[in-house]
Image (spheres, rainbow, N blue to C red):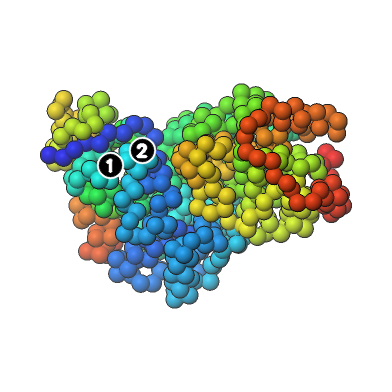
Amino acid sequence: MPKTVAEKILSRVAARDAKVGDLVIVPVSRVMVHDSVIDAVIAGLRDLGRERVWDTTKVAVFVDHAAPAPTPVVADSHRVLREWVRAQGIATFYDAGEGVCHQIMVEEGYCEPGTVIVGSDSHSNSYGAVGAFGAGMGATDIAVALALGRTWLRVPESIKVTFTGKPRKGVTMKDAIMRVVREIGTDGARYACVEFHGAGSLPQGDRITLAGMTTEMGAKAGIVVGTPEAPDWLFPDRGAAYANEVIVDLSTLEPQIAVPPRVDQVVNVSEAVGQPVDVVFLGSCTNGRLVDMRQAAAVLRGRRISPEVRLEVVPSSRRQFEDAMADGTLLSLSAAGAVIGSSGCGPCLGRTGGVLAGQEICLSTANRNYRGRMGSADASIFIGSPYVAAVAALTGVIDDPRPYLEASDAEFDDLVARRRAERTGRGAASVRSGDRSRELMVAAARSGVAAEIDD
Amino acid sequence: MSRAWVFGDDLDTDQIVPGRYAPFMVGQDKFHTYAFCDARPEFAKAVRPGDVLVGGENFGCGSSREYAVAALAKHGIGGIVAKSFARIFFRNCINLGIPVLESESALGVVRDGDAVTLDLSAGLLRAPAGDARLRPLAPFAQEILGAGGVVAYLREHGDFPPLA
């Protein structure tokens, strides 16, 4: 029988012929554990009667979900985590400020293509960016995997997603994956593996955006086919059977917006134009990389964001943070009025950083907009690309970023003024210390952002 | 007899226990008292051991957070019957010993507050308006549930149940 990529990986690691629907018990090549589940994981191991993890070299531990610790309770939990890491002798440990687990797992090379990796966070699907079968699991499953070095899986059906064409300027793979979520729905890939075709040669960051967002369709895993990291055998057989197929033509795609409180309630940006926002969050494992920050800086062009909007930028890892520092991107974002947070999950899940108040409206580049996700249950979260986020920060409303990228300086100022005028009666205008925006922007431009801005 | 608590489609883990009330945030002894605090504020006080949750499609979607299930286990939930379950939630329930059963008809038959009986051996959820048929679980999952969860199973047997 011709096999999908999921069937190939699971057949290989289970050392048997694995078909859709089979239960298999498989070795894992790595287990990812993060701070917010550590108490339950340690308790699980203790209850299992296994004090030691099965292989300290195959465990990666991260403090990222509420980091640096926002409360004494969380700080105590982090202390327990560090003591456990030391007692176990786990070397692959990334403390607060190093970044989001998924970004580090992929960019630092902890994800072996063609193997199974389980992680304590639901977005562990991200490891499919380099061809690994990454699956998120709960604390007890993680404790069992840490004890045995194995896990059980039902061999999933696969859904084939094919991208064709090239996106126009101002349209990103975030828009592409939101379009896919719109087609498939929040449970349309339940128990399934989403196999991406036509995306293997994209930059690694775009592939993380794609694979990680498969979680929002209920998928067990999301795997990008044909990546440079993948071994030769990691492709589906001709004639492999798929439960569903979706084709997205990138060349005609518009920027996409997910409307609260559902990730699959996705509209073209033209249908959301004028929607006011109070807070903009640029970050997360989905869109917190250098390229995302550069896209935002390219929109801002040395201007200041709306005085009534808060913009929070949280680079997804120290590597991304430092790259954005070195080329002036962070300087230009700060000069525009952004708050820059230390690398980590940040406000994506409402545990630390700028949480939302009741009635507040946020435009986030992250992956989820459930009720209560980023703070108050009475806040609303729209999701979009970094370009959309930057325009929302600039104008205080959702708008199509493409005209801003094409406009002359005079046209640009006119666009911004018109949108700002539409937004009334929200928030209060903040003084942005000093007025050095232009001057800092010039300095930043000299060190690298210029090319992007002049595009 | 137990009470049925009926929910709709796409009940996410943030609604079961909002992230701000994670054990990580409020401590291990309190988090379950916030179960459904936004969606069903009366739940945590009124729920009784053995009560059954009934839902629609994609029950338990969202985050992998197991404490959503741990909160339900602490309240002694006797089982969850839904049209379909989110995958991580489904595994978490099996692991923590809460029977999770798919049923096409339960949501149409059971009303919130009904006195119901979850009859696992007959594969039925019995309600005043009729019985809802439950899809049988894989023997592998039944074995784990029978032991009261995966930790108890592994302690007793040292390894996963044999695959069929």
Q: What residue is drawn where x is 44% and y is 50%?
A: B20
Q: Residue at x 40, y 51 (%)?
A: B21
Q: SS class of the residue under badge 2?
A: loop
Task: Give coordinates of residue A153: x percent, y percent.
Answer: 38, 49
Residue at the disc numbered 2: B39
What chain is tagged by disc 2?
Answer: B
Asked if residue A229 is positioned above or below residue A310 in the image, the reply reads below
Per the image, the residue denoted by label 1 is: B43
Category of crowding for the residue at label 1, using alpha-carbon neighbours closer than 10 angstroms: few (below 14), some (14–19), many (at least 20): some
In which quarter of the view is residue A174 placed?
A: top right
Q: Mark 1 touching mark 2, by CB under 8 A?
A: yes
At 43% from the left edge and 69% from the top edge, which residue is drawn? Answer: A80
Q: Where is residue A315 in the image (x, y as percent from the top left)?
A: 65, 53
Residue A420 shows up from this direction = yes
Observer-nearest residue: A338 or A182?
Answer: A338
Q: Which amino acid does label 2 sit on?
A: Ala
Q: Tell whether A317 sits left or right of B32.
A: right
Q: In this view, does A131 lie to the left or right of A144?
A: right
- Is there one chain holding both mark 1 and mark 2? yes
Q: Can residue A191 be seen in this view?
A: no
Q: Position of residue A203 (x, y in %)?
A: 68, 46
Closest to the observer, A369 or A45: A369
The type of residue carrying mark 1 is Phe
Q: Within the image, what quadrant is residue A190 found in?
A: top left
> What secondary structure is marked by label 1?
helix
Residue B61 vs residue A302, the one in the foreground: A302
C-alpha separation, residue under disc 1 versus residue under disc 2: 9 Å
Q: Left or right? Give the position of A353 relative to A318.
A: left
